[in-house]
Image: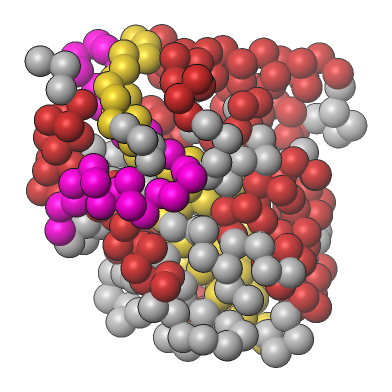
Amino acid sequence: GGSAGEVFEFAERWRAVAAPSHACSLVDPERVRAELGSGALVEFVADGDALLAVLVTGERVTLRRVGDVRQVKEAIVRLRYALRRQCSATPQPRCDLESVEAAALEVEGLLLRPLLAELGDGPLVVVPVDALHTLPWGALPCLRERPVNVVASAAGWVRARELARARRSGPPAVVAAAGPALAHAHAEVRSVLACHPDGREAPGRTGPVLEALATADVLHLAAHGVFHARSPLVSGITLEDGSLMAYDLLDIPRSPGLVVLSACNSGMSRTPVEGAPLGLPGTFLAKGSACVVAGLVPVRDEGAWALMSMFHELLVAGRPPDAALASAAAKTGETGFVCFGAGDHPLY
């Protein structure tokens, strides 16, 4: 019937039923508007072959048709392919850079161009649907340098913000660990810990890393990432004695407020039912993390080192994780990482 409020309520109720661990209670648009401030939230909904967007801002709630589901899915595949090709080329040829830009502009035109006049220029919260769970949002030209948070539902974002606000005061307890077979993983860990004088390095093994989850406020893992589309809960981070899988996280009693997965494809999820993304970010968020920063595409080892060093410098300078990631990505050109959950609360 074209009612933005009714579509929002339907989408949120469906997501809450599909994944109650991500959204313990329903929220109405007014609560979301109160939380947004100068930002905006876009909740995507698939209606058959049509892709709709419910746009929530401080002024209004509107419903827009933004494109065709199949066209969007194919455009995202082309963008991901262009980013993978760019990553594998050293040095990066101009044609690869141009193909990434062209593919990013195509996705942007299908998804966000109908909304740009109303989006404003503040932080953006995105609730994806279908193939949008595999989109590195920071690669889109209109979102570069803009803080973007990706969540399973609007209610999940409100819950994550509450978790971030409830974090204990004072400097965070930072733990970092490096996995094997990466040229710059240990250098990256040293750079991260140099930003946090009270931080400590944990051995890159599953036992010490699981132990760190019980005490750390910030956990940084620099390692290889593996995503299994057919069995997303066995996706994981490669450590010295095996893989830390999403499955291993199901029984942990707590999770750090901020988890940084400096690993290729560590942010990938499979979503058999909308609102229930299965993979590492969704599992960490369901276990109590407020924010997870993870890679959605292959990233060059030296590029991840540069990005993460700047990201942590900005965190210590008082920038919230979402803004720190957006700024570091713009300065280094590494746009394959995404901020999941609520990353708008400073750690310092």
Which region shows up in magenta?
A: 25-51
Residue at 89% across, 32% down:
91
Relative to residue 261, is residue 222 drawn left or right?
right
Which residue ends up furthest to the front in the rendered image? 59
Q: Position of residue 64 (x, y in %)?
A: 31, 17
Residue at 30% across, 82% down:
253
Q: Is residue 45 magenta?
A: yes
Q: Is residue 216 above or below residue 10?
A: below
Residue 170 visible at all: yes
167 or 62: nearer the viewer: 62
Looking at the rendering, which quadrant does residue 65 occupy?
top left
Number of marks: 0
Q: Is residue 94 above or below residue 202?
A: above
Residue at 27% across, 12% down:
50
Q: Is residue 108 magenta?
A: no
Q: Position of residue 37 (x, y in %)?
A: 44, 50
Residue at 48% across, 29% down:
119
